[in-house]
Amino acid sequence: MAEIKLEKIYKKYGNSKDNTIENLNLKINDKEFMVFVGPSGCGKTTLLRMIAGLEEVSSGNIYIDSQDVTEMEPKERDIAMVFQNYALYPHMSVFGNISYPLKQKRKIVNENGKEEYIKYSKSEIEDKVKKIAESLNLTKLLKRKPKELSGGERQRVALARAMVRNPKVFLMDEPLSNLDAKLRTQTRGEILNLHKTINTTFIYVTHDQTEALTMGDRIAVINKGKIMQLDSPEELYNNPQNIFVAEFIGNPQMNMIDGVLEKDNIIDIIDLGIKLKSSTPINAEIKPVIGIRPENISISESKGILVSKEYVEFTGNEKILHVYKNDLKIRLTIDQNVEARENIIINLNTEKIMLFDSITGRRINTSFEMVEI
Ligand SMILES: Nc1ncnc2c1ncn2[C@@H]1O[C@H](COP(=O)(O)OP(=O)(O)OP(=O)(O)O)[C@@H](O)[C@H]1O
């Protein structure tokens, strides 16, 4: 069991004037694969280090299985952490690296209910290392030194070293960022398998939204020390609750287009020459922005919005067509060839248009119909 609860967490470094983490509340369920994602400097690593006990909180409490661990030393928290630079001991073999945590004394509660420090025997250590090495495909490499391994192999040794203690919680800080694209995908799969087999709580930090979407049971999107949205990958993609999440999740990015609110809940999208009527009343105080994903815009042969082609981006599995109308630039994903055309007619899938308020950044739940074209 390892449920983690963060309650009213604040973190301020030294005498900086802003909080790095501000009033953050979060419950991570037992056995969940939780991902923290957000731009560089948003506070992901700080948050992870506070959970591990490597960084003090300025205020607030951290609980693991209802036990307040806020003041506890890292080694008492039963947490394993894997970093971006996996920091293996260079002079030790793979076996030595993996077995290292087992050679430390550990605290147990004996039959009489008393705390006691014990060590694993040599054969116990060998057994444990062998099992983990097998599960991560490292058996043949146990005698090698880290410098004789590839990046992916080193990463697996770091994982093995973290796993060998059977921790309650796994924390991983951008563990794949030193690997090339192919190894990243492969190791991603290995980490997910690992999560399934050992059935413990994982918290995984990344700034890469694709990695977040493919790995997380739930994802906390963080910006400037605050959780902008906590949801499943599908919900984040289909139902972003604010402009930040709408733009951060999804590649190519969602198109954001300014509008002007008119009477009768009609929004004039001046740059595109269209008007949209909202099904729910819209507060006159808002500054409307509509959002539409590139896959929800299509090319039409007849009626629609006339735009000019800028360029086509080929990404391997899809093409992204960049078009413009006046000063407005729009991205859409396409499968047909438009090389020869300069002027293109596009249509927005009205059902998929989202509305945001650019003043507060918040999503406004409504649906639209096109009233004029
Ligand atoms: N020890 C420190 N002293 C002062 N400021 C710090 C310290 N560590 C981090 N910061 C600041 O706190 C903020 C959050 O840093 P953090 O490393 O948590 O971000 P991150 O989201 O993990 O970023 P990245 O993706 O670039 O690793 C940054 O502005 C950083 O400069």
Image (cartoon, helix red, strand yellow):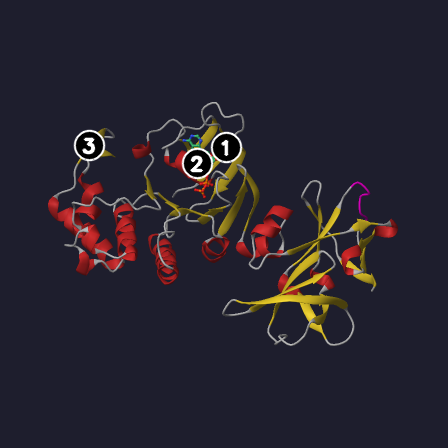
Dot label at residue 46: 2
Q: Position of residue 323 (x, y in %)?
A: 67, 64
Q: Is mark 3 within 8 Å of ligand 1?
A: no
Relative height, residue 267 to residue 48 (above, below) = below
Query: What residue is drawn where x is 53% and y is 42%?
Result: 222
Amino acid type of the residue tagged 3 in the rendering: Tyr
> Can the viewer see residue 278?
no
Q: Estimate the spatial distance between the alpha carbons at disc 2 and disc 3, rounded to whole Å.
A: 31 Å
Relative height, residue 110 to residue 123 (above, below) = above
Query: Which circle's residue, 1 or 2, is located before the other in the chain?
Result: 1
In the image, taking residue 13 as reference, residue 273 lies left or right, namely: right
Amino acid type of the residue tagged 1 in the rendering: Thr
Q: Is mark 1 within 8 Å of ligand 1?
A: yes
Residue denoted by label 3: 117
**Magenta-colored span:** 281-285
> What is the secondary structure assignment of the residue under circle 1?
loop
